[in-house]
Image (cartoon, helix red, strand yellow):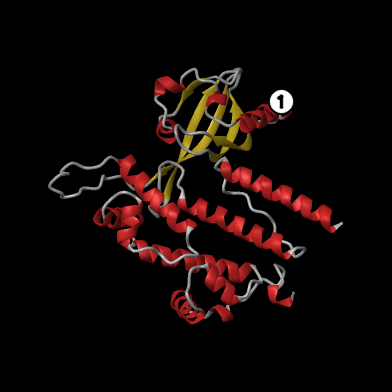
Amino acid sequence: MKKVYNEERIVTIHQMLFEMARGNFNSRIPLSSNDEELETLVVLINMVAEEMKESIFNVGYVNAHKTLQFIAQSAFVLDASFFIKSFTPEVTSFLGYSESELINLPLSGIITAASFEQLYDELDVNVSLPTTIALDFTPKEHLPVSVSCTIGKLVNSSEIILNLVTPTRQDSYRPLAYENENEKHNKTRKADALLIQKLYDYILAHLEEPLPSLKVLSSEFGTNEHKLKDGFRHFFKTSIYQFYNEERLKRAYFMIEHTGIPLKNISAMNGFNNYPNFSKSFKKRFGFSPYELKRNETGITSLLED
């Protein structure tokens, strides 16, 4: 019986990883207490999904820790065959397509195949329009974005109205300037952002290790220390080390709260050389020691009980 349950659990994990691979970071795997090793893996996967959801904004390259502004009243007008006949101006900035590219484009060209099938089935069985449905849009050159949409129809017309709330960033981009004798011009948004995104991803993937020096990091990413340091602060409004320390403490907090992994192990898993340093940093950040944080009694039982 346990073997069957574990096999089902592994299938669920595979499904979660597939969703993350296609850009969906909203799913979570429910926790249980049936198997310590699998549940530890589940917790870590859920944690990665949460981190990815926070770090990637819907339109752009990196999360500059800015709030998204939501603009309502965006809409598509579709014909009976789901071809786009008209739309409000906001959708061009949301999707990254020009007006000429969107007009007469089939809706299937800007939403995922699963969403199009879901929409088609909804219209086929639901005669009491309007109705609300979540669709995964595919902006040009960006990850899919899940948007809540309302489907309706015009009176005495076969045309379909698709109303949605489109996200956009509140802050505007200003390229970084570097006062270097050999470089007087500004770098483009994409080049700057992708470089810092790579550094961001590297830090999150190596939280269990000591952070390399700025000199080593700049050599690793093929740039200079000044550009790496100033670029990171420009996008994330914090220093590289402060970000690294904040993220590993957040991960440690999550692991303490949701697992039974011993505190010393969690300390080591998050890059701290010894437990006293970890405990001191944790208390400074959260106002209480790791030992004082209440652990989820319904989650994984302590590995020390084995």
Q: Identify the residue at horizontal 58%, vertical 32% (top origin).
A: 112
| Direction right: furthest residue | 1
- SS of the residue under disc 1: helix
Residue 140: where, in percent of width, then height?
45, 31
Query: Vertically, is 212 above or below 82?
Result: below
**107 or 44: nearer the eye?**
44
Q: Quadrant of residue 212?
A: bottom left
Residue 202: where, in percent of width, then height?
44, 54
Q: Is residue 119 visible?
A: yes
Q: Identify the residue at horizontal 67%, vertical 32% (top origin).
A: 118
Residue 302: where, in percent of width, then height?
69, 74
Q: Quadrant of residue 258?
A: bottom right
Q: Name the residue type under label 1.
A: Asp
**The N terminus lies in quadrant:** bottom right
**91 or 197: nearer the eye?**
197
Residue beneath disc 1:
124
Q: Identify the residue at horizontal 29%, vertical 53% (top origin).
A: 231
Query: Vertically, is 29 above or below 125?
Result: below
The local crowd at label 1, few if under 14, some if 14 to 19, many if 20 or more residues have their Cα within 10 Å, is: few
Q: Identify the residue at horizontal 37%, vertical 65% (top origin).
A: 241
**The C terminus lies in quadrant:** bottom right
Query: Vertically, is 297 above or below 238?
Result: below
| Left or right of 49 in this view: 195 | left
| Left or right of 217 in this view: 51 | right
| Left or right of 58 in this view: 23 | right
Residue 284: where, in percent of width, then height?
43, 78
Q: How many numbered discs, if any?
A: 1
Q: Is residue 235 visible?
A: no
